[in-house]
Amino acid sequence: MAIDVKGVLSPLSAIGTLFEHPRTLTYPEVKKDIPIGYRGFHINNLETCVGCASCEEICMNDAIDMIHPDREYNVKNTSGCIPRIDYGRCCWCSLCTDVCPPGSLKLDNICTHADCDPDNFLYMPKNHKNIGEEAS
Ligand code: SF4
Ligand code: SF4
């Protein structure tokens, strides 16, 4: 019976990869650079948001609800409401930021969030950049 020498030896070529540079990143210690213009989580400048709900109306995925916060953020917000985003529905089309009259609603380039609680994917964007933090 002939031995398939090539078939026996070729898996051993994988040993060579032990001496190569790693091809993966040790996330979260090492993170990839996010490209400029990447559409990540929303931020909302609550000093200028007027609570008009244009963002809620334009959203084709029904990903935005207008919510009464527990405090007033600015006197121009006559409805007293601010948008809350459901990241289970959002497709990051950015229509909501396009129609925002004062330009308070924007997309940041922060795009990673892991959580076991689905309620933590309902997010009220505030003046900060971390979805996991509550602004004062
Ligand atoms: S980015 Fe698009 S899908 Fe997401 S909340 Fe805004 S309008 Fe809706
Ligand atoms: S984020 Fe913009 S569009 Fe949405 S309620 Fe505030 S001002 Fe209106």
Image (cartoon, rainbow, N blue to C red):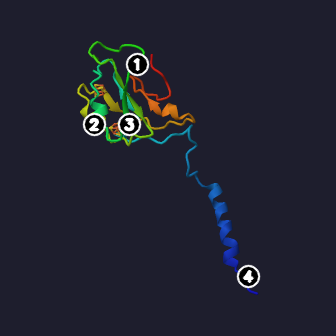
Farthest residue, direction right: 1
Q: Amino acid at mark 3?
A: Ala
Q: Residue at x 37, y 30 (%)?
A: 65
Q: Which residue carries the number 1 mark?
A: 69
Q: Amino acid at mark 1?
A: Pro
Q: Which residue carries the number 3 mark?
A: 63
Earlier-in-chain disc, 3 versus 2: 2
Tell which tag, 4 or 2, sits nearer the viewer.
Answer: 2
Does 54 sit left or right of 25 as displayed?
left
Which secondary structure lies at badge 2? Answer: helix
Earlier-in-chain disc, 1 versus 2: 2
Does 51 sit left or right of 32 as displayed?
left
Earlier-in-chain disc, 4 versus 3: 4
Dot label at residue 3: 4
Earlier-in-chain disc, 4 versus 2: 4
Observer-nearest of 59 and 131: 59
Dividing the picture into quarters, in which one does residue 69 lie? top left
Dot label at residue 4: none
Taking the image in four quarters, ligand 1 sits in the one at top left
